[in-house]
Image (spheres, rainbow, N blue to C red):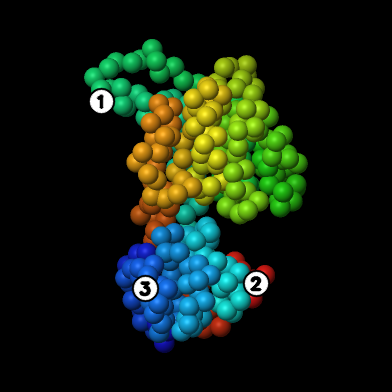
């Protein structure tokens, strides 16, 4: 039997599954100070979401003897993969569970942006009938650029094509035949993607390579005019990871009118400061990192990560180890 710390919450069914598998589950937060002292002592595994930060300093704390780290979700930028690998600790994630939920949120933000839904709602609450100010544009006849072309991006692309958008992608790790099979135009450079698309949606991990990938120069290169000739403006959506978008660049582009709208579910620093200047911009709207926050996704992610952690503890095969290169 293994002793497993669950620090950021987990679906009850997943906790029950681990218990039935013979493990002791301690479902409670561990503070950053506790992590740096004896917070992980006597645990064989830990399952986190994005709140708990497993830094090099934490993982190198004397007495840490973890056999596996589980990330209940996709992104692992809150875990030092190299430090875990140096300690011989596999890190596993659950990338499939939240796909549908993130796809739907992305589309929600995209539609809300081009039809001014947040602004329209605010104007009604302010007692104004601002119909003439809310002229939007259609998605049909426009080019959607996807940064990254994994499961989520491919699903977004299929839906976008079904309503008449031309889908473009940039993913230097993607075999071209995959994009071709889905009727997607794959660009060899990120700059080419921006210069061809009025709508950009981000679907890649945060790495040193992708940090501030969306910057002022690339935003300024966006065409503002749709393939159908409509003056639709430029729009950016990020439901992936904070830090990929240079938020100062987005702010400047909104102020200058280069960017017509921006919608972020993720921010470089979370929780976002209420005084963040983007929150004061009329053509910006955001959500508090809720991409996977659906009943269905939480149930799936809990069971997926429980099974992956259990497989490692039992020395069984697992396809979701994300730090193999450091082990």
Q: Secondary structure at mark 1?
A: helix
Do the residues bearing badges 2 and 1 touch, measured as CB atoms within 8 Å?
A: no
First reached walking from the N terminus: tag 2 or tag 3: 3
The residue carrying mark 2 is: 326
Q: CA distance from mark 2 to mark 1?
A: 53 Å
Q: Residue furthest bottom?
A: 1
The residue carrying mark 1 is: 125
Q: CA distance from mark 2 to mark 3?
A: 26 Å
Asked whether the viewer can see residue 255, the reply is: yes
Quadrant (top left/top right/bottom left/bottom right) for the N terminus: bottom left
> Depth-wise, is mark 1 or mark 3 nearer the camera?
3
Dot 1: few (<14), some (14–19), or many (≥20) neighbours within 10 Å? few
Do the residues bearing badges 1 and 3 touch, measured as CB atoms within 8 Å?
A: no
Asked whether the viewer can see residue 153, the reply is: no
The x and y percentages for residue 111 are: 46, 31
The quadrant in which residue 158 appears is top right
Q: Residue at x 49, y 61 (%)?
A: 78
The x and y percentages for residue 11 are: 35, 64
Residue 34, label in figure: 3
> Depth-wise, is mark 2 or mark 3 nearer the camera?
3
Q: Secondary structure at mark 3?
A: helix
Compared to residue 81, the image places residue 262 above or below, namely: above
Dot 2: few (<14), some (14–19), or many (≥20) neighbours within 10 Å? some
Dot 3: few (<14), some (14–19), or many (≥20) neighbours within 10 Å? few
The x and y percentages for residue 174 are: 71, 51
Do the residues bearing badges 2 and 3 touch, measured as CB atoms within 8 Å?
A: no
191 horizontally vs 226: left or right: right
305 horizontally vs 186: left or right: left
């Amino acid at each position: 039997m293994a002793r497993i710390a669950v620090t950021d919450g987990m679906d009850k069914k997943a906790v029950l599954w681990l218990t039935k598998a013979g493990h002791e589950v301690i479902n409670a937060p561990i503070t950053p100070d506790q992590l740096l002292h004896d917070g992980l002592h006597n645990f064989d595994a830990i399952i986190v979401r994005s709140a708990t930060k497993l830094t090099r300093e934490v993982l190198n704390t004397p007495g840490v003897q973890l056999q596996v780290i589980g990330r209940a979700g996709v992104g692992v930028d809150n875990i030092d993969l190299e430090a875990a690998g140096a300690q011989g600790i596999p890190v596993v994630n659950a990338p499939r569970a939240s796909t549908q939920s993130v796809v739907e949120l992305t589309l929600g933000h995209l539609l809300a942006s081009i039809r001014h839904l947040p602004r329209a709602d605010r104007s009604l609450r302010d007692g104004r009938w601002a119909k003439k100010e809310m002229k939007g544009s259609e998605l049909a006849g426009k080019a959607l650029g996807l940064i990254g072309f994994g499961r989520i991006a491919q699903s977004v692309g299929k839906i976008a094509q079904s309503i008449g958008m031309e889908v473009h992608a940039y993913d230097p790790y993607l075999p071209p035949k995959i994009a071709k099979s889905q009727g997607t135009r794959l660009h060899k450079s990120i700059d080419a993607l921006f210069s061809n698309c009025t709508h950009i949606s981000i679907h890649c991990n945060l790495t040193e390579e992708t940090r501030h990938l969306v910057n002022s120069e690339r935003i300024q290169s966006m065409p503002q005019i749709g393939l159908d000739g409509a003056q639709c403006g430029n729009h950016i959506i990020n439901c992936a990871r904070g830090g990929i978008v240079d938020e100062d660049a987005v702010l400047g582009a909104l102020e200058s009118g280069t960017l017509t709208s921006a919608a972020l579910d993720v921010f470089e620093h979370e929780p976002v400061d209420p005084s963040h200047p983007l929150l004061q911009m009329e053509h910006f709207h955001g959500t508090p990192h809720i991409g996977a926050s659906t009943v269905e996704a939480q149930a799936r992610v809990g069971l997926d990560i429980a099974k992956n952690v259990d497989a490692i503890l039992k020395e069984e095969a697992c396809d979701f180890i994300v730090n193999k290169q450091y082990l």
